[in-house]
Amino acid sequence: MRFEVVDLGPVAQKLVLVGRLDASTVGIVEIPFTGTVAASGKSAVLDLTGLEFLSSLGIRLLLSVTRVVSRRGGKVVMFGAQPMVAEVMEAMALGDVLPMVDTEAEALARLAA
Amino acid sequence: MLELDIAIDLSALEPAQARIEAHLAACGAPPVQQLRVRLVVEELIANLVMHGRFAADPPPPARVSVQREDTRVKVVVEDAAAPFDPRGARPAVTPRSIESITIGGAGLTLLRRTAAIGSYSRTATGWNRTEMQVS
């Protein structure tokens, strides 16, 4: 599991998640991932196109990061989930707090709304 | 059928999952089904690591068997934790705001929405035995 950061300007950044976000990997990325989001003070779009697997511990990290951003007045929107990841997110019915759309353009529009 | 012991430790999950995935791939299970089985095994073992109460320290490993039957995969997990029937666990509550989220129960909610829990019983040796089917 790894993530990359792409600066999208003064109000947003893109975090590209690659690999599996699960019990075996969440402990490795939790601190740098949360720290990156918190330090920027920006809203975030999460690019899930390279995320192959997501479990409840991974969801816990995504929710934690969303809470950090929300407390600073920002938003988090996810896009591009692979079928298994989309299935997990839909099963958890988290769309109200952690919205997921198909494309990056839709995610950026959601941030601006 | 693949049978393996998985230590009650998150670090034991990945090598076990790799073996399960290789077995399912050899049986012709499609990738999405392999991922569902991965999710089911992770949620059960992670739940044991975080919430299981065991008489022994360290606890004995869980016994997991995986078998493809027609188009489904039968997963059986036996563990020495205190009695726990995952069918009766309260589902996670759908949050209305990010501040109202309590993530407790998420793993078991995912488990029950991913697998059909066919049965739960106690073995003659006092272990939990949970049988599931994954489509």
Image: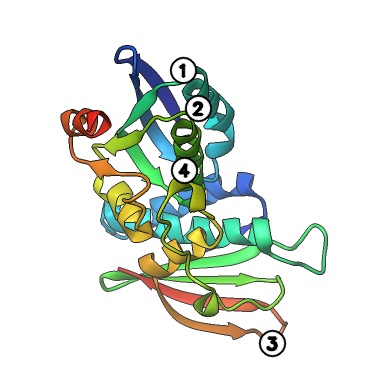
Q: What is the three-letter code of the residue carrying label 4? A: Leu
Label 4: how many Cα within 10 Å (few below 14, some 14–19, many 20+): many
Give the image quarter of residue B120: bottom right
Instruction: Tell me the element at label 4.
Output: helix
On the rendered structure, is A16 left or right of B104?
left
User: How much space separates mark 3 and mark 4, taking CA atoms?
Assistant: 41 Å
Say which residue appears at 77% left-offset and 67% top-offset: B54
For residue A33, the mark is: 2
Which mark's residue is nearer the viewer, 1 or 3? Answer: 1
Say which residue appears at 27% left-offset and 31% top-offset: A111
Residue A65 pos. (x, y %):
48, 35
Residue A70 pos. (x, y %):
44, 35
Same-subunit check for callouts 2 and 3? no
Instruction: Tell me the element at label 3.
Output: loop
Say which residue appears at 41% left-offset and 61% top-offset: B94
Residue at the disc numbered 4:
A63
